[in-house]
Image: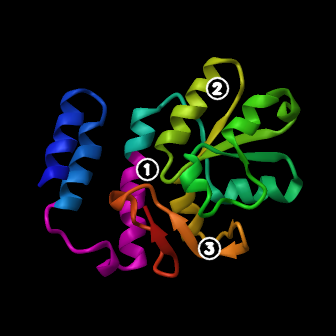
Amino acid sequence: MERQKAALVLAARGVLAPTLVLIAVAGCAGQASRADLTDEEKLARVEEMVEEVERRFPEVKAVTVEEVGRLLETGSVVLVDARAPREREVSWIPGSITSEEFEQDPDRYAELTVVAYCTIGHRSSEYAKRQNEEGRPVLNLRGSLLSWTHAGAPLVGPDGPTNRLHVYGETWDLAPARYETIW
């Protein structure tokens, strides 16, 4: 009940989009546990959330996991992790850099396609929007880590390959069942 109140307060202040509030409130209202959902049901919810992100950030161009895979094969992309340090400490996309690393020397990546990611794409869309406004072309990874994991793409952590994923919060606990999720 407290989470529902908090979500409604944030919506009233304009911090959360109404659709995201409905998702957050529904997640607190006694629906089936995320663990009870099939991977297909989780992916369907991810897609609903991604569509909301795209409505909120129509000016941010997105690329799919498959498109990023092709860019990785040619070495023509740099992936920028727009998440908080506590999330990045759990796992990340192999070869990605932090937003801080990118911002220290953005010219270093001028010849590459720059793609930001987070858990679902909201924060990376915000990041891409800011970077684009500063004249640095940055795309968003559509569905970010949740789409990445549903596509079967790898993650690494401090000790190498991992199936652990920080999903930001319970609302976003939609990774495939083979992943250990934390928030």
- Distance from label 3 to label 2 (Cα)? 29 Å
Query: Could you say whether the residue bearing mark 1 is in a helix, strand or loop?
Result: helix
The amino acid pointed to by label 1 is Val
* Magenta residues (range): 29-51
Query: What residue is at 70 percent from the left and 28 percent from the top?
Result: 137
Q: Closest to the observer: 2 or 41? A: 2
Query: Could you say whether the residue bearing mark 3 is in a helix, strand or loop?
Result: loop
The amino acid pointed to by label 2 is Gln
Query: What residue is at 84 percent from the left and 30 percent from the top?
Result: 110
The colour scheme used here is: rainbow
**For residue 94: magenta?**
no
Which of the two labelled residues, at mark 1 and mark 2, occupies the earlier sequence position?
1
x, y (%) of residue 176?
48, 75
Residue 96 horizontal side relative to residue 109, left or right: left
The amino acid pointed to by label 3 is Gly
- Distance from label 1 to label 2 (Cα)? 20 Å
**For residue 31: magenta?**
yes
x, y (%) of residue 57?
46, 32
Query: Could you say whether the residue bearing mark 2 is in a helix, strand or loop?
Result: helix
**Which label belongs to residue 50?**
1
Q: Closest to the observer: 169 or 129? A: 169
- Distance from label 1 to label 3 (Cα)? 18 Å
What main secondary structure does the magenta stretch of the protein show?
A: helix
Residue, disc 3: 152
Q: Quadrant of the C terminus?
A: bottom left
Q: Quadrant of residue 138?
A: top right
Which of the two labelled residues, at mark 3 and mark 2, occupies the earlier sequence position?
2
Residue, disc 2: 131
